[in-house]
Amino acid sequence: MAANKDRANLWLAAKVPGASFNQVGIASIQRDPDTQLILELSPSEEVCHFCAIIAPLDEEMPEASLFTALELNRFGKPLGGCWLAWEPDSQMLTLCWNLELADADEISFSNAIDNFIAAIDGARRELLPQSEEPMATVPFELA
């Protein structure tokens, strides 16, 4: 399935010049100081997993953060089909999504990245409403 990795590398480099999947199939894209996307090819290289750290639980009301995350996951619409998961190692909520590479092309891959970034911002707005400073929304330098 090296062909899928090669295609994904071409699509990624077209979207973010200089970005590529490493030997084990992981790529990291830093949008701004607060936003890092991790793209990981499945062992079969048939799926590209998208992941980004969203927020820690509210220290004063962790149950409220979890309840909000569950509400956002309920039908997937508020997150554009993405879902929130708990990352025990970092103690953070993360946003996740999968792209089937067999059904993708360069345009859908690029759109998937853009849509995932929009979902990151939307999830943060819901989970960090107390933040007075809005999250940075500076787009990538696109080729």
Image (cartoon, rainbow, N blue to C red):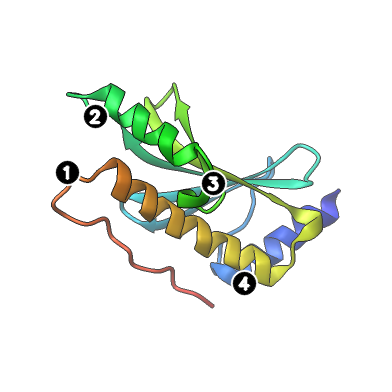
Disc 2 vs disc 1: Cβ atoms closer than 8 Å? yes
Name the N-terminal-most of marks 1 and 4.
Answer: 4
Q: Nearer the viewer, mark 1 or mark 4?
A: 1
**Where, by quadrant of the figure, is residue 58 drawn?**
top left
> Does dot 2 land on a helix, a strand or a loop?
loop
**Where, by quadrant of the figure, is residue 57 drawn?**
top left
- Badge 2 is on which residue? 58
Q: Residue furthest bottom?
A: 143
**Marks 3/2: CA distance?**
21 Å
What amino acid type should be assigned to the residue bearing mark 1?
Gln
Q: Residues within 10 Å of mark 4 (few under 14, many from 20)?
A: some
Across and down, in percent, residue 74 comes to 50, 37
Name the N-terminal-most of marks 3 and 4.
Answer: 4
Q: Residues within 10 Å of mark 1 (few under 14, many from 20)?
A: few
Residue ID at (54%, 78%): 143
**For this rendering, which residue is in front, 83 or 33?**
83
Q: Residues within 10 Å of mark 2 (few under 14, many from 20)?
A: few
**Marks 4/2: CA distance?**
38 Å
- Badge 1 is on which residue? 130
- Badge 3 is on which residue? 82
Residue ID at (74%, 67%): 105
Residue ID at (25%, 43%): 128
Which numbered tag is attached to residue 37?
A: none
Disc 3 vs disc 4: Cβ atoms closer than 8 Å? no
On screen, residue 143 versus residue 106, left or right, reads: left
> Does dot 1 land on a helix, a strand or a loop?
loop
Name the N-terminal-most of marks 3 and 2.
Answer: 2
Q: Measured along the vertical axis of the image, is residue 84 above or below residue 114?
A: above
Name the N-terminal-most of marks 2 and 1.
Answer: 2
Disc 4 vs disc 2: Cβ atoms closer than 8 Å? no
Across and down, in percent, residue 80 comes to 52, 54
